[in-house]
Image (cartoon, rainbow, N blue to C red):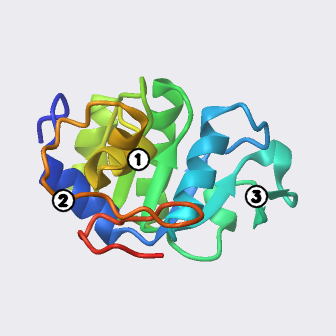
């Protein structure tokens, strides 16, 4: 896998397939990127399990915070890592040793660990590094273009605006 460039098909496939996300490094601080991403993923219908040992037992956006991956209710479809690259490597190693393998390990913007990615892929796990699922979802759904950002996606389909938060999905169907 070339981790310098991901096809839209690869990213879209992941975002369509995933239903549960364990977010390592989730923050209750409303100005932190992990808070924004958690809020966004929840608004898109994903079940997100925040992981932060300092916040364990508390709630972030109505979601119970867990101390570690061992404490989440089930094996998540995706692990979203909001930690530095070195920590990401350690997290991947712990996941592989646990035997509770997710479908996807996603490392946030600026987070990259090529050796960990190779080990995860050898175990059958898809890996995305140095990307944000919020940004990718917005780009692929066309939402990001509503804010004047070039999504590099050309479409003749006009967005259907509704009251409340917009949810267009990646399947091309407009949802409320």
Q: CA distance from mark 3 to mark 1?
A: 18 Å
Rendered residue at 48%/76% (across/down): 176
State yes or no: discs 3 and 2 in contact (Cβ < 8 Å). Answer: no
Graded by Cα atoms within 10 Å as few (under 14), some (14 to 19) or many (20 or more), the crowding at tag 1 reads many
- Look at mark 3 in the image and give the residue it sits on: 61
- Look at mark 1 in the image and give the residue it sits on: 133
Image quadrant where residue 67 sits = bottom right
- Quadrant where the image shows the N terminus: top left
Q: Is residue 104 above or below residue 76?
A: above
Rendered residue at 25%/70% (across/down): 171
Q: Is residue 156 left or right of residue 13?
A: left
Disc 3 or 2, which lies upstream in sequence? 3
Q: CA distance from mark 3 to mark 2?
A: 33 Å
Q: Residue 57 location, x and y as percent?
A: 86, 61
Q: Is residue 155 above or below residue 164?
A: above
Secondary structure of the residue carrying tag 2 is loop
Graded by Cα atoms within 10 Å as few (under 14), some (14 to 19) or many (20 or more), the crowding at tag 3 reads few
Secondary structure of the residue carrying tag 1 is helix
Q: Is residue 115 left or right of residue 43?
A: left
Disc 1 or 2, which lies upstream in sequence? 1
Q: Nearer the viewer, residue 138 or 6?
A: 138
Point out which mark residue 157 bears.
Answer: 2
Q: Is residue 120 left or right of residue 157?
A: right
Rendered residue at 67%/55% (across/down): 50
Q: Residue 117 location, x and y as percent?
A: 28, 40
Q: Nearer the viewer, residue 90 or 151?
A: 151
Secondary structure of the residue carrying tag 3 is loop
Q: Is residue 5 left or right of residue 123?
A: left
Q: Residue 8 location, x and y as percent?
A: 16, 48
Q: Residue furthest right?
A: 58
State yes or no: discs 3 and 1 in contact (Cβ < 8 Å). Answer: no
């Amino acid at each position: 896998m070339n981790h310098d460039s991901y096809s839209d098909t690869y990213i879209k496939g992941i975002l369509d397939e995933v239903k549960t996300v364990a977010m390592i490094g989730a923050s209750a601080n409303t100005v932190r990127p992990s808070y924004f991403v958690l809020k966004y993923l929840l608004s898109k219908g994903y079940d997100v399990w925040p992981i932060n040992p300092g916040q364990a037992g508390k709630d972030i956006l109505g979601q119970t915070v867990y101390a570690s991956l061992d404490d989440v209710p089930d094996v998540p479809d995706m692990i979203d890592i909001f930690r530095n690259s070195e920590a990401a490597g350690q997290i991947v190693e712990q996941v592989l040793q646990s035997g509770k393998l997710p479908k996807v390990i996603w490392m946030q913007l600026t987070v990259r660990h090529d050796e960990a990615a190779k080990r995860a892929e050898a175990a059958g796990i898809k890996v995305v590094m140095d990307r944000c699922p919020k940004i990718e979802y917005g780009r692929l759904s066309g939402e990001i273009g509503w804010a004047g950002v070039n999504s590099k996606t050309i479409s003749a389909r006009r967005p259907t605006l509704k009251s409340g938060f917009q949810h267009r999905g990646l399947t091309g169907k407009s949802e409320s």
